[in-house]
Image (tube, rainbow, N blue to C red):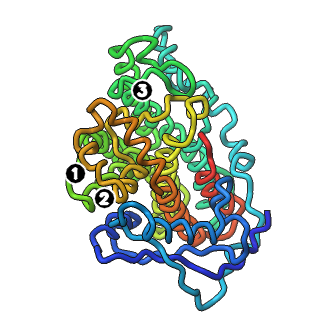
C-alpha cells in the first residue's frame, strides 16, 4: 500500500456549545481543535479502509445531515476549509502487526494456562475456557509492539524484555477476567461464538473463576517487582470497576450524556490498553515523554476500538460478532450511534432515560439509528481518535514496530468483528 498521500483538505468541528466539544474531545482532558485531513482524489479516505468513504461522500453526507434531515442536529457538524500547506503522512511501507508480534506471541496462551494451572480439573477447565488461542490477541499485540518500539527509541535492541512480555500476559488475564464478570452481570449466553462460562458452569462458578484469574494476574504482577508497573496496572482494575458502575447510570443533559459515555468507554476498554502500553514503556525507557506517548497511543486506540465495536452492534450480524446484534440496546445502553441519532430523533431521549425498557423500544431505537447518520458520525469520531494515536506514536524514533502500531489504527477502523 502506497502511503505517500498528499493531503489537501480538512474538516473542522464548529458549534456554539463549548461543553459538548470538550465532551467529544476526550483525548487529554483539555480543549483541542481537531483537523482531519483527506485525500485530494476521489478514492477512499486513508484510514477508513473497507468503508470506502470518499471526501465527496463525507461532505455531502454531513451537509445533508445538517440541512435536509428531519431535525437539525444540536451536535457539531463538519465543513471543509483549505489547508495552507501540503502534508505527507508517511512514505514508509507500514509493517504487518501480526507478523512482527508473532515471535513474541508464540505459545502465549499456553504460558497463560501454565500460570493458571491448578490441580482441581474443573477450575482449570473454567480458567482455560477463553484462553484457547482463537481470539484476536489484539491487546497482547499492542503491548509487545509498543514494548519493542520503546526499546528501540531508547537506543536498545528491538527485542522484547521478559518482563514486558509478562505485562502483556497480565493484561490479557485482567481483560479476560473482566469478560467473565461482564457476562455474569449482563446475563450473556454467547461470547466469541460459543457459550459463556456462566451459561456452561453457572454464575457462581463463573464469578469465582474470574476472581481466580485476577488473583493469578496479581501474583504475576508482584513478581515483576517494579512499583510503577504495579501502580498503573492496578489502576486498570480500579477503572474497570468504576466504568461498570458508570454503565449502570444515565445522564439527562445532552452534553453530560456524551461525556459520560466517553469516560465510561475509557474506563471499561481504553484504560487497559493505555496503562499496559505505559507499563511496557516503564520497562523499556526512563523518559517520561516516552511513557506519555505510550499511554496516549493506547488511550486513543482503545477508545476508537470501542467506538467501532459500538458501531458493529448495529451493522454486523451475530455470526460475525460472535454475539447477538443489538446487544447494547437490549442491555439498556445508549452508545455512540444512539447518542448521535438522538440529535435527529429526539424521541430517543425518553427511551434512553428508561434504558429501552418499554415494549418496542429496542426495535424503534434500532430503526432511528439506521435512519440517522449516527453510525457515520461514530465512525468519524473513531477516526479522529486514531489520528491522534498516530500523531502520538509518530513521536517515537522510526522502527518497524512503530510503523506497525500506525498500521494497527487502520485495522481498528476497518475490522468487521
Question: Tag 2's secondary structure?
Answer: helix
Residue at 66% across, 66% down: 54
179 sits left or right of 347 in the view: right
First along the sequence among labels 1 and 3: 3
Q: Is residue 19 above or below residue 269?
A: below
Q: Residue furthest left?
A: 252
Q: Are marks 1 and 3 in contact (CB under 8 Å)?
A: no
Mark pair 1, 3: CA separation: 27 Å
Screen quadrant of the N terminus: bottom right
Disc 1: which residue: 251
Q: Nearer the viewer, residue 215 or 339?
A: 339
Mark pair 3, 2: CA separation: 27 Å
Residue at 69% across, 78% down: 40
Q: Give percent across and percent down for residue 284.
A: 55, 58
Disc 2: which residue: 259
Would you say residue 244 is visible in this rendering?
yes
Question: In the drawing, what numbered circle is on residue 202?
Answer: none
Q: Are marks 2 and 1 in contact (CB under 8 Å)?
A: yes
Residue at 55% across, 28% down: 192
- Disc 1 vs disc 3: which is toward the camera? 1
Q: Nearer the viewer, residue 125 or 303?
A: 303
- Disc 2 vs disc 1: which is toward the camera? 1
Q: Is residue 97 above or below residue 365?
A: below
Q: Residue furthest bottom?
A: 84
* Number of other residues with Cα within 10 Å of mark 1, as a class: few under 14, some 14 to 19, many 20 or more: some
First along the sequence among labels 2 and 1: 1
141 sits left or right of 270 in the view: right
Amino acid at each position: 500500500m502506497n502511503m505517500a498521500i498528499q493531503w489537501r483538505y480538512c474538516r473542522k468541528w464548529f458549534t456554539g456549545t463549548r461543553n459538548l466539544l470538550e465532551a467529544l474531545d476526550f483525548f487529554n482532558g483539555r480543549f483541542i481543535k481537531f483537523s482531519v485531513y483527506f485525500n485530494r482524489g476521489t478514492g477512499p479516505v486513508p484510514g477508513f479502509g473497507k468503508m470506502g468513504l470518499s471526501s465527496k461522500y463525507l461532505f455531502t453526507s454531513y451537509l445533508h445531515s445538517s440541512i435536509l434531515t428531519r431535525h437539525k442536529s444540536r451536535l457539531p457538524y463538519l465543513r471543509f476549509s483549505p489547508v495552507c500547506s501540503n502534508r505527507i503522512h508517511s512514505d514508509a511501507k507500514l509493517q504487518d502487526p501480526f507478523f512482527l508480534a508473532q515471535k513474541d506471541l508464540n505459545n502465549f496462551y499456553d504460558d497463560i494456562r501454565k500460570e493458571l494451572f491448578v490441580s482441581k480439573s474443573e477450575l482449570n477447565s473454567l480458567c482455560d475456557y477463553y484462553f484457547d488461542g482463537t481470539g484476536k490477541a489484539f491487546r497482547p499485540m499492542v503491548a509487545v509492539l509498543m514494548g519493542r518500539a520503546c526499546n528501540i527509541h531508547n537506543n536498545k535492541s528491538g527485542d522484547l524484555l521478559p518482563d514486558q512480555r509478562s505485562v502483556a500476559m497480565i493484561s490479557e488475564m485482567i481483560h479476560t477476567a473482566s469478560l467473565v464478570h461482564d457476562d455474569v452481570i449482563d446475563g450473556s449466553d454467547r461470547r466469541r461464538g460459543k457459550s459463556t462460562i456462566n451459561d456452561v458452569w453457572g454464575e457462581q462458578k463463573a464469578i469465582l473463576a474470574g476472581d481466580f484469574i485476577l488473583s493469578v494476574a496479581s501474583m504475576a504482577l508482584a513478581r515483576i517487582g517494579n512499583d510503577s508497573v504495579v501502580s498503573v496496572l492496578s489502576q486498570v482494575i480500579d477503572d474497570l470497576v468504576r466504568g461498570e458502575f458508570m454503565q449502570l447510570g444515565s445522564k439527562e443533559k445532552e452534553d453530560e450524556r456524551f461525556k459520560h459515555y466517553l469516560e465510561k468507554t475509557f474506563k471499561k476498554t481504553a484504560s487497559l490498553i493505555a496503562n499496559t502500553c505505559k507499563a511496557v514503556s516503564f520497562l523499556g525507557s526512563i523518559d517520561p515523554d516516552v511513557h506519555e506517548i505510550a499511554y496516549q497511543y493506547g488511550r486513543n486506540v482503545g477508545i476508537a476500538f470501542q467506538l467501532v465495536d459500538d458501531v458493529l452492534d448495529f451493522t454486523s450480524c451475530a455470526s460475525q460478532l460472535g454475539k447477538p446484534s443489538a446487544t447494547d440496546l437490549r442491555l439498556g445502553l445508549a452508545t455512540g450511534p444512539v447518542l448521535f441519532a438522538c440529535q435527529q430523533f429526539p424521541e430517543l431521549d425518553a427511551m434512553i432515560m428508561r434504558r429501552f425498557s418499554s415494549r418496542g423500544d429496542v426495535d424503534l431505537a434500532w430503526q432511528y439509528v439506521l435512519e440517522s447518520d449516527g453510525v457515520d458520525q461514530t465512525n468519524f469520531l473513531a477516526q479522529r481518535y486514531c489520528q491522534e494515536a498516530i500523531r502520538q506514536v509518530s513521536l517515537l524514533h522510526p522502527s518497524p514496530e512503530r510503523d506497525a502500531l500506525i498500521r494497527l489504527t487502520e485495522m481498528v477502523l476497518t475490522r468487521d468483528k
